[in-house]
Image (cartoon, helix red, strand yellow):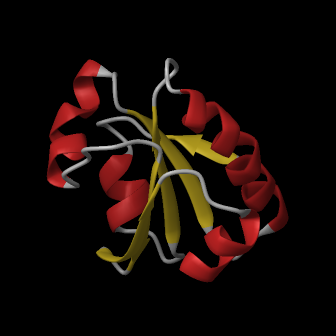
């Protein structure tokens, strides 16, 4: 399915109303650890059709409300949403196995 780029306009439908679990990757272009984690997140997105994988650039002006809502203090941060509720989160670079365990 690939990775969704979340926007203020599609967030509600793609995440909160999703019938599948959603893995959200909070990242920024200047963040070295984010660049290390990104290909692993992309790999999970390509391999798993039973989940949605989405990314939020914390520097995007229109996403600041959502970044604040999740109290993002450090990146990269992964959050798992199921049925509109946060069920898991991880901060920092983790392995593919650890990402799968979050789900």
- 13 relative position to 53: left or right: left
Confirm whether residue 103 shows in the render.
no
**Quarter of the rendering occupied by the C terminus:** bottom right
Nearer to us in this view, 100 or 16: 100
Residue 57 vertical position relative to residue 45 in the rendered view, above or below: above
Residue 38 vertical position relative to residue 22 in the rendered view, above or below: above
Residue 81 vertical position relative to residue 23 in the rendered view, above or below: below
**Residue 56, how many percent across, how many down?**
43, 39
Nearer to us in this view, 49 or 90: 90
Confirm whether residue 73 shows in the render.
yes
**Quarter of the rendering occupied by the N terminus:** bottom right
Q: Residue at x 26, y 47 (%)?
A: 72
**Residue 2, how many percent across, how many down?**
73, 49
The number of callouts visible is: 0
- 52 relative position to 69: left or right: right
Among the 4 quarters of the image, the one containing residue 62: top left
Among the 4 quarters of the image, the one containing residue 61: top left
**Residue 86, how many percent across, how many down?**
32, 74
Among the 4 quarters of the image, the one containing residue 52: bottom right
- 27 relative position to 51: left or right: left
């Amino acid at each position: 399915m690939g990775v969704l780029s979340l926007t203020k306009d599609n967030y509600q439908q793609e995440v909160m109303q999703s019938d599948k679990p959603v893995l959200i990757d909070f990242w920024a272009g200047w963040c070295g650890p984010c660049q290390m984690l990104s290909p692993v997140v992309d790999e999970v997105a390509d391999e798993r059709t039973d989940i949605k994988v989405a990314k939020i650039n914390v520097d995007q002006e229109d996403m600041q409300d959502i970044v604040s809502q999740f109290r993002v203090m450090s990146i990269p941060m992964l959050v798992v949403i199921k049925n509109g509720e946060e069920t898991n989160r991880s901060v920092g670079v983790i392995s593919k196995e650890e990402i799968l365990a979050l789900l």
